């Protein structure tokens, strides 16, 4: 097995970068986009918001897991040699300056430019008489009826604080007794964060409005002071799948338990909050002082997304419509090509968001749903968007038409559990067979299979993708998908579905690479083959690289002379450029308008030929060992050329590209020609549209 080279292990844990700290470096690159003066103003605001929402998930998932280790007394170090306590300390040390950078760019760059553009976020004190009148009217009609002030005394214990809610902590005084009490008011999540008071008026944060009206919530009491705060809970469902008779019921119960019982991991408080109030919150939430983070004017900066939604196209990226793939066009513009006729001739490779998700993925499923010759449709769903997801509706239509429809719905897709429960119930009511995958493994593979009766017998048509069947993210995430009628791939996809829906053992696959069945083994084989060649090359584009065994295997290949290029959007625990270990490995990261989400693997060289695979798997332990993932070969020469052009453009990118060095630091690649991978792909799509 690759990665067992004693020389590699002699480097010890230092050969790995820490996963959590690497993730923070990814979010630092997102923050750098908010700081980039070349971007449109509201796009910079959007990236400042994404930086915050990323941190919310980081604390819920990664920091939550570290806190669980601390509570359990786990002292074993991670692969990089750090204990959970060490990592928590280093997270804070890295995060504090990042938060200062975010505050600085908002206060000194973005806010003044927003004011110049006519967008101002005001405090209550900033409002004139007309503004206060409009705000008061909005409070009475929209806000006050849904508020529930909660006091704390012997009859009212400290309230449960819901995850990521924005709250006001209030000191109250009884004028008759001079007794001081604490109260908490939760801002209503269903209302906009920024109240739009009218034409020409500024935007008022809802906590400012509630704070100004606290006397109406506590009549007869004297309001001494109030300050906003926010609490983050861990996101663990704590499911015991081995004991669960019904996974649907277990996930539903776990969601309720998450709402009630999950542990706090972060407290965010206004910098001006007095120490006594801060300590009351911290002690009741059972947090350490190092779990408390301060903010200045605004908390919950993820809500800055609301500013990006303002109708100001002059402050955003220019519109970029997805084009219909050339091979799927019909002579009549209002009609779509016959998908099955096209696939009988050739495979189809689509690239979102540059090419239309609606005109390819959705069209494929809808044509199958309406085709009288289609007998069965099988599909996986991981993240699905709302109830009106066209793919889900097409599957419902097919089931109601009497076709055999089997859908593997992953109920445990983190933060989408409730939505997936609802999609599963909708599909079941339509008559589809809904299953929840394999116990102990999340089903993350992106697969669709259509079985069609034709003159010469049954034919299988497959779609294997890198992204979710989600029309919303398909407009913002960069992803690839392969449609094919290849019989061997069709048999592999069918065998994988049988494994997911039945009790069959792991099948043997002819072409697919499937985790956790054969993916590691096949990767080892292909790496070993490159090690035997004088021009061994590997190029990989993924979202994350963390699995220690895979990292060691890549390092062993590097030591044997294989040139390895990694394009990693997020976490990378591989330390590149270390003499005697990984000097033949380079790591780049590209960020931009779209979230780079596709996973592409290339083995071989131009002299010997290239082997390309795409699919759902990153090089993370969870993907390789704890999830069902699928990669498909890409074999058509024109598709190989297209992927080669993608990698060539990625190498040229000096617009929003970073490079990782052996110390674990990311350095922005200097702008020389200002070449952007994403702009190049957008331009290529427009050129295709013109044809």
Image (cartoon, rainbow, N blue to C red):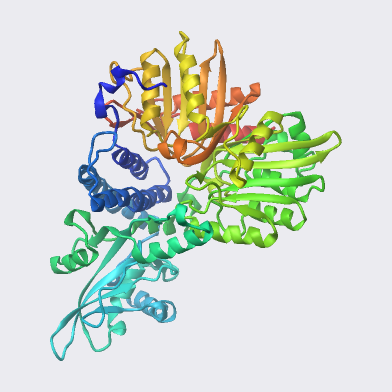
- Nearer the observer, 605 or 30: 605
* Identity of the residue furthest to the top in this view: 534
Query: In the picture, residue 355 is in which quadrant?
Result: top right
Q: Nearer the viewer, residue 544 or 308?
A: 544
x 29%, y 32%: residue: 17
Q: Front-most of 430 and 345?
A: 430
Q: Percent from the top left, x then y, of residue 120?
A: 36, 61
Residue pictured at 55% horizontal, 10% vertical? 607
* Residue drawn at x 68%, y 41% as measured from the top left: 449
Quadrant where the C terminus is found in the figure: top right
Name the quadrant containing residue 667: top left
Give the residue drawn at x 29%, y 34%: 79
In this view of the protein, can residue 573 be seen by the observer?
A: yes
Residue 123 percent across, percent down from the top left: 29, 68
Which residue in the rendered view is the most extreme toward the right? 455
Q: Quadrant of residue 298?
A: bottom left
Q: Position of residue 581 (x, y in %)?
A: 31, 19
Please say whether residue 690 is visible from this viewpoint: no
Q: Return the residue found at the far bottom.
A: 176
293 left or right, relative to 164 = left
Please state the horizontal and vertical placement of residue 464, each as a whole percent of the image.
61, 37
**Quadrant where the N terminus is found in the figure:** top left
């Amino acid at each position: 097995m690759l990665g067992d080279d004693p020389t590699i292990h002699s480097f010890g844990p230092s050969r790995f970068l820490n996963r959590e700290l690497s993730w923070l470096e990814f979010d630092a690159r997102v923050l750098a986009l908010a700081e980039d003066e070349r971007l449109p103003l509201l796009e910079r605001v959007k990236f400042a918001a994404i930086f915050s929402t990323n941190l919310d998930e980081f604390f819920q998932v990664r920091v939550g897991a570290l806190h669980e280790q601390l509570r359990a007394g786990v002292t074993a170090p991670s692969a990089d040699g750090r204990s959970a306590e060490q990592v928590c300390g280093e997270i804070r040390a890295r995060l504090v300056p990042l938060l200062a950078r975010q505050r600085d760019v908002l206060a000194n760059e973005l806010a003044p430019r927003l004011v110049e553009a006519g967008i101002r976020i005001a405090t209550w004190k900033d409002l004139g008489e007309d503004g206060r009148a409009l705000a008061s009217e909005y409070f009475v009609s929209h806000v006050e009826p849904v508020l529930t002030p909660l006091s704390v005394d012997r009859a009212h214990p400290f309230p449960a604080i819901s995850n990521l809610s924005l709250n006001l902590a209030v000191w109250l005084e009884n004028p008759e007794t001079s007794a001081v009490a604490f109260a908490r008011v939760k801002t209503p999540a269903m209302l906009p964060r920024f109240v739009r008071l009218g034409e020409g008026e500024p935007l008022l944060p809802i906590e400012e409005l509630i704070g100004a009206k606290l006397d109406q919530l506590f009549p007869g009491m004297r309001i001494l002071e109030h300050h906003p705060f926010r609490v983050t809970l861990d996101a663990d469902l704590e499911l015991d799948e081995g004991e669960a008779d019904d996974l649907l019921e277990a996930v539903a119960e776990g969601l309720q338990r998450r709402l009630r019982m999950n542990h706090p991991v972060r407290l965010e408080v206004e910098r001006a909050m007095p120490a006594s109030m801060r300590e009351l919150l911290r002690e009741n939430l059972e947090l350490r002082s190092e779990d408390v983070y301060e903010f200045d004017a605004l908390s919950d900066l993820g809500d800055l997304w609301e500013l990006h939604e303002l109708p100001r196209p002059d402050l955003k990226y220019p519109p970029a419509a997805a084009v219909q793939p050339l091979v799927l066009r019909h002579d009549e513009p209002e009609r779509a090509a016959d998908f099955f006729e096209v696939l009988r001739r050739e495979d189809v490779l689509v690239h979102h968001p540059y090419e239309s998700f609606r005109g390819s993925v959705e069209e494929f499923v809808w044509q199958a749903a309406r085709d009288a010759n289609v007998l069965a449709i099988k599909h996986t769903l991981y993240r699905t968007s709302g109830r009106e997801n066209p793919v889900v509706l097409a599957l419902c239509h097919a089931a109601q038409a009497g076709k055999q429809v089997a859908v593997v719905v992953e109920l445990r897709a983190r933060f989408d559990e409730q939505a997936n429960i609802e999609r599963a119930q909708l599909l079941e009511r339509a008559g589809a067979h809904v299953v929840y995958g394999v116990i102990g493994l999340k089903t993350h593979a992106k697969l669709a299979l259509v079985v069609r009766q034709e003159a010469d017998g049954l034919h299988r048509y497959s779609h294997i993708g890198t992204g979710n069947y989600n029309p919303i993210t398909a407009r913002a995430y960069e992803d690839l998908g392969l449609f094919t009628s290849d019989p061997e791939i069709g048999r592999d996809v069918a065998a994988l579905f049988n494994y997911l829906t039945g009790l069959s053992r792991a099948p043997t696959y002819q072409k697919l690479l499937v985790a956790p069945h054969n993916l590691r083994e096949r990767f080892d084989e292909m790496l070993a083959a490159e090690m035997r060649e004088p021009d061994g090359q590997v190029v990989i584009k993924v979202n994350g690289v963390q699995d220690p065994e895979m990292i060691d295997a890549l390092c062993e290949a590097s030591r044997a002379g294989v040139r390895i290029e990694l394009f990693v959007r997020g976490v990378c625990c591989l330390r590149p450029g270390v003499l005697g270990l990984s000097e033949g490995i380079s790591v780049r990261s590209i960020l931009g308008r779209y979230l780079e989400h596709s996973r592409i693997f290339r083995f071989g060289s131009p002299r010997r030929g290239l082997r390309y695979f795409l699919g759902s798997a990153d090089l993370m332990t969870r993907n390789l060992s704890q999830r069902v993932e699928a990669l498909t070969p890409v074999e058509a020469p024109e598709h190989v050329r297209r992927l080669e052009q993608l990698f060539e453009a990625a190498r040229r990118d000096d617009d929003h590209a970073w490079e990782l060095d052996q110390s674990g630091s990311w350095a922005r690649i200097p702008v020389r020609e200002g070449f952007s991978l994403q702009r190049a792909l957008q331009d290529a799509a427009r050129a295709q549209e013109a044809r």
